[in-house]
Image (cartoon, rainbow, N blue to C red):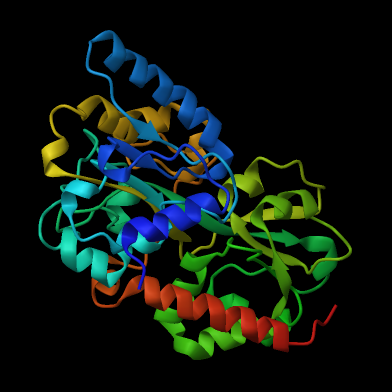
Amino acid sequence: MKTLDQLMASVIQSGQQDTPDPGELDLLLYSPCPVKLAVKERLDAVLQAYEDAGDPVSIHIPMGCTSVDPYDPLHLETDPDRLPDIIASIGFGDFFRKGFVDRFVNTGVFEAVLPEKVHPLHEQAGIVDPEGRYTVYALTPYIFMADMKRLGDTPPPRTWEDLLDPRYRGQINMCGDGDDMADAALMSIYKAFGMEGIEALAANAHGLMHSSRMGKSGGSALGGGIYILPYFFAETSLQPEHMKVIWPEDGTAASPIYFLAKRSARPRLDKLLEFFTKGFGEIPSARWFLPLGGPAPDNLAPDARIKWVGWDFIRGNDITAVRDELNATFRRLVQETPCDS
């Protein structure tokens, strides 16, 4: 069996160069692709402030959209000293895996760092980790976009349960192309309706599409009448008049954008941590990702809610294994389902 160092070296050789040793990093940051450049620009200013103070810090932000990532094996590490001081990532991925959680999260290596005030939207949904380990500093909210012309006399969905109704057979465009997948949507449906809910959703699917294409494809004759996509792409794409953005009445299914900060990282890295608790929300385009401390987008309805899967569910399951199983099952079911148009 390959060692962790050998695994990382083999990934680097497959396409990545100039990759710092993770134990030497102050910050390893996976950022949502639509705001990655803006995030890097803000952090460059923070880095310069550290440099000017004579205390330079080392950060790494993988900039490409390739699936080849030299830090993919990092969750297998056994020595906390060989982890970056701050790990920031997206979704229910490797840093939620049971082995990593057992070795580092549950043993108190990391401590949450919260903004001065948590936005009421997040507070009501229970986004803050009650055990004080993870800091979910933003979310990827999944909402609906309906092609009213294509739906015709069929009313658009208002809740996640509506999507399971057979009247939407062949109508649902689901974001899920390559590594892209609306894992929070699948998890919310699975939690509420079990595998029968996943099967019903797959039976109604028209097909899978990358989320970055969805906003550009609204109203396409090649698609179904309903899109499940991130809020960012629904709101930042110019749509025909017959396209309607719908925030689900029972709440947007939310995928975490989070960081894990070592207790030992403070107070030295507090300026870096302040970017997550405050600076991220100051990026205009980042507001579509609902920063923990706000502000929320100006056009967000006052009764908007977040449908968070919940920390009890996360900790009561090997959540990454659940995600992987649901993603694989849904893809298989969609491939087996004839497309009705």
Spot occupied by residue 24 in the image (x, y as percentages of width and height): 27, 37
Q: Residue at x 34, y 20 (%)?
A: 46
- Quadrant assignment, res 320: bottom left
- Quadrant assignment, res 338: bottom right
Spot occupied by residue 4 in the image (x, y as percentages of width and height): 32, 60
Q: Residue at x 45, y 46 (%)?
A: 302
Left or right for 216, reference 7:
right
Q: Residue furthest top?
A: 52
Q: Residue at x 17, y 47 (%)?
A: 81
Spot occupied by residue 187 in the image (x, y as percentages of width and height): 44, 73
Left or right for 172, reference 32:
right
Spot occupied by residue 315 in the image (x, y as percentages of width and height): 24, 71
Q: Nearer the viewer, residue 81 or 323?
A: 81
Q: Residue at x 37, y 62 (%)?
A: 94
Q: Quadrant of the C terminus?
A: bottom right
Q: Give the vertical position of 195 relative to 99 (above or below).
A: below
